[in-house]
Image (spheres, rainbow, N blue to C red):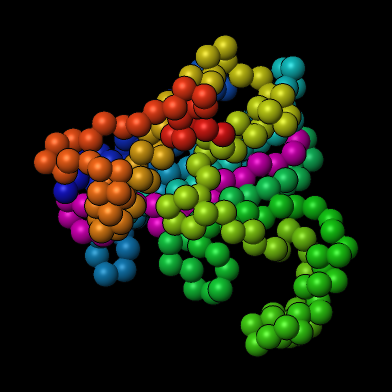
């Protein structure tokens, strides 16, 4: 059972995102993240929408010049009163500036209505081979239907319409991974202690995902603990390795 109300959990989630961005990108006069917006959903209950405060995205600089913008939206709810807040749908996007051209987008849908992966990555670019393969689509019923859809709509399949699976419900990337990619690949301006902030946030995110997995699959957790000889009457010690970073923070 959750210790805090649904609204409190949504506020804490938004604050965690805000702390991450301030610790990595730097504090400024305005917040990065808007306050959670509650919306009534069909069948009762409330969904909370958490997104960046600036509608056009958060400017990200390199050498003081804006080269990227970051946008994110999280739709969250609780399955029942006193339950843990869950992400029902999310989107994280980077665009290149000043043209505002999409570069990549991570999407997640807990209950997808089609055969796309629940968690997936779209990369915006050109790849003629991918387009040719998507137009061919002769391999089976699903691919034939996909090709028919392209033809009927008169739409040319682009590389950006490919959905690359990225770990499913529990193993999908977090906002921390997108930020670290931007740091390493685009050399964006960051705070001196950015890595500490990012790793702390990533460890928290992954800890929550691990706990959720254990709640869903307690039998597997039990079997794993038995396999390593744990005494289940006491809290087991976490094994560590000195030759590599913890898996909770590893990029």
Residue for point 48% across, 68% down: 112
Q: Measuring from the top left, give residue 39's x and y in whole percent.
A: 34, 55
Q: Is residue 123 left or right of residue 248?
A: right
Residue 24 or residue 51, whichever sits in front: 24
Residue 103 highlighted magenta (yes or no):
no
Task: Name the residue at the right extreme.
Answer: 128
Q: Does residue 8 sit above or below 187 in this rendering?
A: below
Task: Please identify the quarter of the rendering in which residue 8 is found.
Answer: top left
Task: Please identify the quarter of the rendering in which residue 77 is found.
Answer: bottom left
Is any part of residue 233 visible from this angle? yes
Q: How many marks?
A: 0
Q: Does residue 92 sit above or below 219 in this rendering?
A: above
Residue for point 37% across, 46% down: 209
Is any part of residue 154 visible from this angle? no
Q: Does residue 2 sit above or below 162 in this rendering?
A: above
Residue for point 62% across, 45% down: 93
Q: Which residues are magenta?
A: 78-97
Q: Measuring from the top left, give residue 215's x and y in whole percent.
A: 26, 53
Residue 89 highlighted magenta (yes or no):
yes
Q: Is residue 168 left or right of residue 133?
A: left
Q: Does residue 24 sit above or below 109 in this rendering?
A: above
Residue 245 or residue 241, whichever sits in front: 241
Residue for point 21% across, 59% down: 80
Q: Is residue 134 left or right of residue 70?
A: right
Q: Measuring from the top left, give residue 251's x and y in whole percent.
A: 56, 34
Task: Name the residue at the left extreme.
Answer: 233
Q: Measuring from the top left, give residue 189's x and y in whole percent.
A: 66, 19
């Amino acid at each position: 059972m959750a210790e805090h109300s649904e609204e409190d959990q949504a506020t804490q989630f938004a604050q965690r995102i805000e702390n991450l961005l301030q610790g990595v990108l730097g504090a400024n006069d305005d917040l990065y993240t808007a306050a959670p917006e509650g919306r009534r959903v069909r069948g009762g209950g409330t969904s909370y929408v958490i997104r960046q405060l600036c509608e056009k995205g958060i400017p990200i600089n390199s050498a003081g010049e804006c080269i990227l913008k970051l946008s994110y939206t999280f739709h969250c709810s609780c399955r029942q009163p006193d339950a843990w807040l869950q992400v029902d749908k999310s989107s994280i996007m980077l665009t290149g500036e000043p043209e505002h051209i999409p570069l990549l987008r991570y999407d997640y849908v807990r209950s997808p209505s089609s055969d796309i992966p629940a968690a997936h990555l779209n990369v915006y670019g050109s790849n003629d081979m991918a387009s040719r393969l998507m137009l061919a689509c002769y391999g089976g019923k699903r691919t034939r239907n996909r090709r028919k859809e392209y033809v009927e709509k008169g739409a040319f399949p682009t590389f950006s319409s490919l959905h690359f699976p990225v770990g499913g419900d529990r193993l999908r990337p977090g906002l921390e991974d997108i930020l670290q990619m931007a740091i390493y690949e685009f050399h964006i301006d960051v705070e001196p202690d950015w890595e500490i902030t990012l790793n702390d946030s990533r460890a928290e995110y992954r800890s929550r995902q691990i706990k959720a997995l254990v709640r869903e699959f307690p039998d597997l957790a039990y079997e794993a603990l038995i396999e390593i000889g744990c005494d289940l009457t006491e809290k087991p010690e976490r094994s560590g390795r000195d030759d590599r970073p913890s898996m909770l923070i590893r990029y």
